[in-house]
């Protein structure tokens, strides 16, 4: 009778996740799953009303579908990132220390979080050219959380050294990057389903899907896109895509130093 009464509320349903459910008496209804557990499922009707029914009143095909839907859901999580920053100054040089931990608390007492990969990206901006950004560091940790449990993810401490302005010896050098933020991105290993994403600034939050495709050392523009690569050492003096040849008698250009290192402790 409960299932039959749902039929009286039927109208055309617009949700793309809606499907036709059939009970063991052959009655059908279009609805979408709102939530489910091992014994019951809550359906949203075309009228936006919801109704909860026993799973065992459905056809075997629909019972299998509900169980599959339940198995694929990410459990309810409370996620708390904790970034501890400190910095030191010595003359014109600076040292930044970043220590990040993230606690995943599973608020679902019936379902665990299967093995998941959490990636951590540290972002730096050139101190001499604000249009240049660099991926200072990428770390990743695999973990899982049991039903109703909690799991802390602790990343290795990162240390970033940079100079606050261009060095006198190399007035055009722009290889120093100050760390200004980070992102976190977690996906379930078995199917790549997104579990969690977090940016420490609104700008980084908007750019997450571009940043997660990058790796340590990548230098990108303000939109986190790699600049078009130029061909080095080809063509003549007038070749627009080449590096001009050094004329006889010209001194060898002074080599720029390597970027300040990221030290992982």
Image: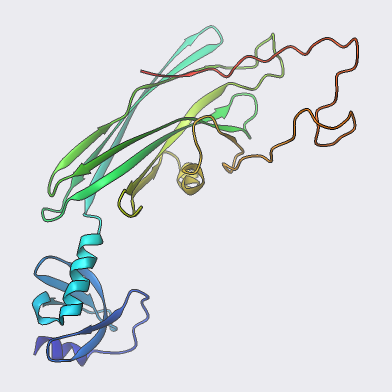
Mark count: 0
Q: Is residue 37 shown above or below 160? A: below
- Which image quarter holds the C terminus? top left
Residue farthest top in this picture:
91
Q: How is the image coloured?
A: rainbow
Horizontal and vertical percent for residue 164?
Answer: 57, 17
Residue 213 in percent (x, y) is at 49, 44
Q: Residue furthest front?
A: 234
Residue 14, percent from left and from top: 37, 81
Q: Quadrant of residue 248?
A: top right
Kindly indicate the quadrant of the structure image that contains residue 130: top right
Q: At x 21% / y 54%, what residue is drawn?
A: 75
- Say whether residue 27 is left or right of residue 246: left
Q: Relative to residue 109, is residue 85 depicted above or below?
A: above
**Which quarter shows the N terminus?**
bottom left
- Tell me where residue 101 sits by quadrant: top left
Q: Position of residue 162 (x, y in %)?
A: 53, 17
192 to 38, vertically: above or below: above
Q: Is residue 209 left or right of residue 141?
A: right
Q: Nearer the viewer, residue 89 or 239?
A: 239
| Rendered view: 102 above or below 57 | above
């Amino acid at each position: 009778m409960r299932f039959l009464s749902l039929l009286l509320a039927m109208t055309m349903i617009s949700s793309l996740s809606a499907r036709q459910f059939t009970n063991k008496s052959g009655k059908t209804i279009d609805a979408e799953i709102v939530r489910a557990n091992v014994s019951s499922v809550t359906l949203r009707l075309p009228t936006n009303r919801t109704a909860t029914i026993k799973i065992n009143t459905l056809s075997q095909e629909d019972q299998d579908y509900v169980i599959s839907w339940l198995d694929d859901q990410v459990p309810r999580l409370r996620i708390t990132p904790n970034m501890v920053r400190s910095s030191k100054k010595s003359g014109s040089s600076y040292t930044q220390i970043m220590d990040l931990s993230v606690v995943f608390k599973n608020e679902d007492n019936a379902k665990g979080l299967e093995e998941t990969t959490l990636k951590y990206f540290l972002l730096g901006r050139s101190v001499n050219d604000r249009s240049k950004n660099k991926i200072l560091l990428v770390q990743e940790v695999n973990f899982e959380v049991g039903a109703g449990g909690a799991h802390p993810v602790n990343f290795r401490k990162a240390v970033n050294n940079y100079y606050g302005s261009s060095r006198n010896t190399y007035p055009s050098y722009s290889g120093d990057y100050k760390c200004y933020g980070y992102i976190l991105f977690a996906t379930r290993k078995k199917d790549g389903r997104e579990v969690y994403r977090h940016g420490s600034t609104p700008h980084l939050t908007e750019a997450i899907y571009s940043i997660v495709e990058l790796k340590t050392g990548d230098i990108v523009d303000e939109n986190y896109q790699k600049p078009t690569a130029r061909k080095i050492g080809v063509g003549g003096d007038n070749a627009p895509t080449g590096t001009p040849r050094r004329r006889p008698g010209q001194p060898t250009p002074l080599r720029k130093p390597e970027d300040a290192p990221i030290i992982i402790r």
